């Protein structure tokens, strides 16, 4: 049985056209937003995805399919499709509107990578929303997952630059990709309703696999390090305090509980290994007036729990969806 991976969600000012130039580090994504518009007495998704860059400008992802495409080929204008940003904000994966194929765009060079048909096309009987995408930190590796219990098919691991495709056999759900793109972490429920984590290498072979303890299976988000074994998970306590636990997927051992220096008011959206001893964490909380969501990124020392705020911005409440680097 597949477990639906938690796909976290992200938003605004000068608009720029597609730049046809050499690599530009300032063009990396800070976040992306999809607006909402009123329709009768409710709101619906509208407009293109807008990517706010590190230089403060906005990039219109004009060729992205915004609305859900159902299994019968019809478009549902009240359901949106997500996009996926790499951890460094350099690349974005999305369905292209013109041919309804999955592509990856490099935001610093504007190059669009087309993918092999078996990966790029939506399988018969599935909607676009049944497909989950995950990028490595630099966007050079893409994992494609088919979500839900009805999609009993293997996932794909794709080297974006070459188009080389490997198969993740079985019915596991992708959770994350290690920062260097060396391993893919996936999960699946066993016949005894316990949760198994599996680390696959880029050829689709199993590197490590364990039925994980409850402190790992009952908490999220999780992320896998480049050693293919060290899993980090954020534990949210009933008091609002947050703790980091690491789990060794090779030795089946759990590390000590480390209190994380993030305010109780914050909810953790995403965690990613940055280096061997540091993680990047995204959190959010609603403003007092509930007119916006304040999103913050942190560097977290995996040994001490100390944190350093690295970015913060507000997402207006009338935004339909938003995406952050790493998801």
Image (cartoon, rainbow, N blue to C red):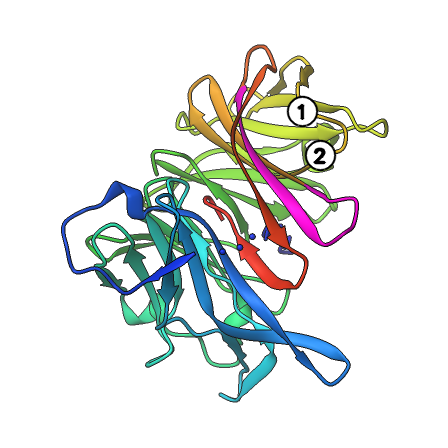
Q: Residue at (58%, 82%) from the top-left corner? A: 77
Could you tell me what secondary structure mostly forms the magenta stretch? Answer: strand
State the quadrant of the N terminus: bottom right
Q: Does the segment drawn in magenta span residue 82?
A: no
Q: In the rendered image, which quarter is residue 21 located in?
A: bottom left
Q: Position of residue 166 (x, y in %)?
A: 32, 53
Mark 1 crowd level (few <14, some 14–19, many ≥20, 10 Å Cα): many
Residue 314 lies, with reference to residue 144, above or below; the image says above
Residue on which the image places disc 1: 262
Farthest residue to the left: give it: 22
Give whichever of 315, 278 is nearer the camera.
315
Q: Are marks 2 and 1 in contact (CB under 8 Å)?
A: yes
Q: Position of residue 64 (x, y in %)?
A: 39, 71
Q: Position of residue 242 (x, y in %)?
A: 72, 25
- In the image, the segment drawn in magenta is 285-300
Residue on which the image places disc 2: 266
Give whichever of 307, 197 is nearer the camera.
307
Residue 87 lies, with reference to residue 298, above or below; the image says below
């Amino acid at each position: 049985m597949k477990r639906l991976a938690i796909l976290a969600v992200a938003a605004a000012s000068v608009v720029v056209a597609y730049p046809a130039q050499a690599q530009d580090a300032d063009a990396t994504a800070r976040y992306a937003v999809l607006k909402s518009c009123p329709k009768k007495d409710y709101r619906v998704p509208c407009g293109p995805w807008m990517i706010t860059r590190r230089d403060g400008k906005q990039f219109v992802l004009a060729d992205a399919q915004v609305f859900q495409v159902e299994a019968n080929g019809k478009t549902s204008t009240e359901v949106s499709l997500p996009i996926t940003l790499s951890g460094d904000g350099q690349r974005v994966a999305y369905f292209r509107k013109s041919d309804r194929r999955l592509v990856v765009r490099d935001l610093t060079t504007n190059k669009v990578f087309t993918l092999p048909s078996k990966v790029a096309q939506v399988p018969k009987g599935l909607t676009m929303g049944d497909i989950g995408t995950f990028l490595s930190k630099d966007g050079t590796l893409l994992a494609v997952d088919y979500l839900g219990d009805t999609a009993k098919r293997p996932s794909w691991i794709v080297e974006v630059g070459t188009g080389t495709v490997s198969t993740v056999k079985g019915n596991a759900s992708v959770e994350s990709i290690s920062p260097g793109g060396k391993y893919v972490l996936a999960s699946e429920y066993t016949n005894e309703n316990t949760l198994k984590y599996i680390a696959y290498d880029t050829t689709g072979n199993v590197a490590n696999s364990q039925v994980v303890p409850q402190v790992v299976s009952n908490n999220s988000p999780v992320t896998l390090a480049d050693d293919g074994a060290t899993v980090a998970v954020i534990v949210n306590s009933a008091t609002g305090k947050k703790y980091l636990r690491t789990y060794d997927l090779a030795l089946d051992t759990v590390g000590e509980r480390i209190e994380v220096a993030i305010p109780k008011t914050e909810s953790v959206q995403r965690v990613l290994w940055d280096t061997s001893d540091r993680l990047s964490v995204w959190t959010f909380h609603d403003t007092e007036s509930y007119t916006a969501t304040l999103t913050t990124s942190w560097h977290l020392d995996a040994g001490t729990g100390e944190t350093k705020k690295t970015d913060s911005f507000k997402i207006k409440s009338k935004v339909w969806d938003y995406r952050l680097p790493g998801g």
